[in-house]
Image: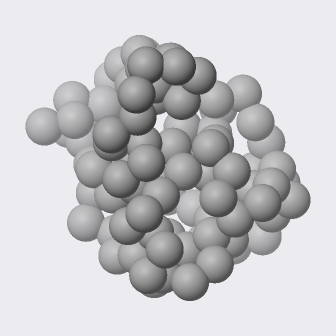
Amino acid sequence: MKTRPRLIRKGIRVLGIGEDDLDRLPKGHELKCLLVWLAHTHTTVNHSWLSERLHMGYPTTVSTYIKSVRLAPPGPLLRLRNKLLRGMQRYEDWPEWHG
């Protein structure tokens, strides 16, 4: 398994999945989309890196995944996004990423 940055590892813990799950989940799975959105929103990691590390397929589709989370209507995906943000606040270095 390739190394993932701290932010993604923390997001994985908050979402309650394992690192190995990322290898098994489908490319556009909502949990992967949330992690891509988190990393894109709070770091300068490029789409190629994200698509490779999170097994998301072509880098050009990463924008679509990010947009699906950013514009999530009320429902399960929005609730998961809010859970992720609340969970990330537990980490003392979160304000550094959150801006």
The residue lying toward the viewer, choosing from 67 and 45, is: 67
Whole-percent x and y of residue 86? 41, 16
Spot the residue most to the front. 73
The colour scheme used here is: one colour
**Which residue does the image show at 72% across and 27% down from the upper left?**
16
Q: Is residue 20 visible?
A: yes
**As drawn, is 56 to the left or to the right of 11?**
right
Q: Position of residue 13 (x, y in %)?
A: 64, 32
Is residue 54 placed above or below 82 in the rendered structure? below
Which of the 4 image quarters holds residue 93?
top left
Q: Is residue 4 above or below residue 98?
A: below
Q: Is residue 61 left or right of residue 13?
A: left
Q: How many numbered discs?
A: 0
- The C terminus lies in quadrant: top left
* Residue under the image location 46 percent in, 69 percent down: 62
Relative image position of residue 38 (x, y in whole percent): 40, 45
Quarter of the figure that contains the N terminus? bottom right
Image-based side of 8 in relation to 27, left or right: left
| Residue appearing at x 54%, y 38% in the figure | 11
Q: Residue at x 40, y 75 (%)?
A: 47
Residues 84 and 65: in front is 65
Residue 88: horizontal and vertical position, in percent? Answer: 42, 25
- Quarter-wise, where is residue 24 in the image? bottom right
Towards the viewer: 38 or 5: 38
Can residue 3 be seen from the camera position used here?
A: no
